[in-house]
Image (tube, rainbow, N blue to C red):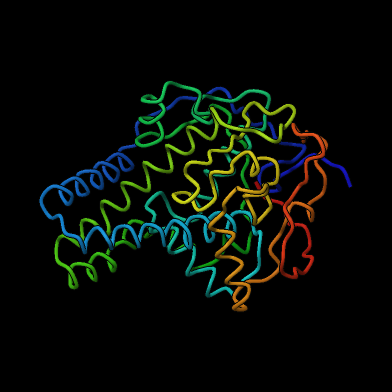
């Protein structure tokens, strides 16, 4: 089957949103949150340095970025690219909230709005990261965009009405508190500042940095015809992003649970999904070969294979669309 890629939350024949005209405005709550984490992380690094605090910072950062942001928030909650029990989904999304960017419903809307804008013929530079790096950093860290004609965005009823996700959305900043109290009880101020503030600061900066490079420079195996913004692969940050750095692959196959598709494209998140499948925790991960062919997707490599061989047995799930 050949058809253009669509995201049912935002793509519909009656959609009349304009992704180009809008204003970037300072977001006070976002600014206070981000600066608070930056200051706390700097104070922790300068005045409460400890080896145990640094170890906690490294391990908890890797855990929340992989189990939470990459697998829970992005590959499962937003794209539904594998199946798992609800308790596991809630746990992973909670860990994704701990990365410190937003609540789950806001993350979903922000992700899909950016994806929709990038797939249009032209979009605002806020969505394309098409400004000089320090202005883009300021925009992404401290601001929000207000489009003059925003698109109509419709979250699925089972997500929109989910009481757990609605609670996570209301309390996403406060969800750091139990972990902060635990870290303080176990390791004092060093563990609190390194485990919360420094971790969130590095996660926010790292997410922006990878997003900036992944939409401006890097290798491409695929081109999406008609899209204002193309994704690029940024191999040097495979571990930091848990495989999210293979952004050209993701633009080509948004619904795939596997992001590193070619030999040598290390995808730590996919490795963890394999282990979880072997333990019976997840099932039916979606691969590019399972997705309908996109008429607007063009390979930039002759005889390019959509996905590297998979060594374990996979059930063939129904196609799930999502941005």
The image shows residue 202 at horizontal and vertical percentages of 33, 46
Q: Report which quarter residue 143 is drawn in.
A: top left
So how many labels did they put on this image?
A: 0
Residue sitting farthest toward the bottom: 280
Residue 117 placement, left or right of 96: right
Pick the front one: 5 or 233: 233
Residue sitting farthest toward the left: 47
Determine the residue positioned at 33% across, 56% down: 173
The image shows residue 283 at horizontal and vertical percentages of 67, 71
Q: In the displayed structure, would residue 130 be above or below residue 71? A: above
The image shows residue 303 at horizontal and vertical percentages of 82, 39
Residue sitting farthest toward the right: 1
Pick the front one: 241 or 262: 262
Determine the residue positioned at 55% across, 66% down: 162
The image shows residue 193 at horizontal and vertical percentages of 20, 56
Residue sitting farthest toward the front: 264
Pick the front one: 19 or 288: 288
Q: Report which quarter residue 205 is drawn in.
A: top left
Q: In the displayed structure, would residue 200 be above or below residue 146? A: below
Determine the residue positioned at 28% across, 63% down: 56
Determine the residue positioned at 68% across, 53% down: 256
Residue 305 placement, left or right of 150: right
Residue 134 placement, left or right of 309: left
Q: Report which quarter residue 89 is drawn in.
A: bottom right
């Amino acid at each position: 089957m050949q058809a253009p890629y669509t995201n049912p939350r935002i793509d519909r024949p009656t959609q009349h949103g304009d992704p180009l005209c809008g204003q970037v405005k300072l977001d006070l709550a976002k600014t206070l949150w981000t600066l608070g984490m930056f200051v706390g992380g700097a104070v922790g690094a300068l005045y409460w340095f400890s080896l145990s605090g640094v170890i906690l910072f490294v391990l908890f950062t890797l855990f929340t970025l992989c189990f939470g942001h990459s697998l829970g928030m992005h590959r499962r909650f937003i794209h539904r690219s594998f199946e798992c029990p609800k308790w596991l989904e809630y746990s992973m999304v909670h860990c994704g909230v701990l990365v410190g960017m937003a609540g789950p419903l806001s993350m979903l809307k922000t992700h899909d709005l950016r994806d929709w804008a990038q797939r249009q013929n032209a979009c605002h530079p806020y969505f394309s990261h098409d400004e000089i790096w320090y202005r883009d950093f300021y925009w992404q860290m401290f601001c929000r965009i207000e489009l003059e004609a925003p698109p109509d965005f419709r979250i699925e009823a089972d997500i929109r009405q989910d009481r757990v996700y609605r609670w996570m959305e209301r309390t996403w900043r406060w969800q750091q508190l139990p972990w902060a109290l635990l870290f303080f009880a176990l390791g004092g101020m060093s563990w609190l500042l390194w485990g919360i503030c420094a971790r969130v600061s590095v996660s926010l900066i790292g997410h922006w940095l990878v997003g900036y490079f992944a939409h401006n420079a890097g290798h491409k195996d695929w081109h999406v015809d008609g899209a204002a913004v193309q994704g690029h692969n940024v191999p040097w940050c495979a571990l930091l992003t848990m495989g999210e750095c293979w952004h050209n692959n993701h633009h080509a196959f948004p619904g795939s649970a596997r992001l590193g598709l070619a030999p040598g494209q290390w995808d730590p998140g996919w490795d963890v999904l394999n282990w979880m499948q072997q333990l019976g925790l997840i099932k039916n991960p979606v691969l590019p070969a399972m997705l309908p062919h996109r008429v607007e997707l063009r390979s930039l490599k002759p005889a390019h294979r959509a996905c590297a061989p998979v060594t374990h047995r996979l059930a063939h799930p129904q196609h799930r669309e999502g941005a």
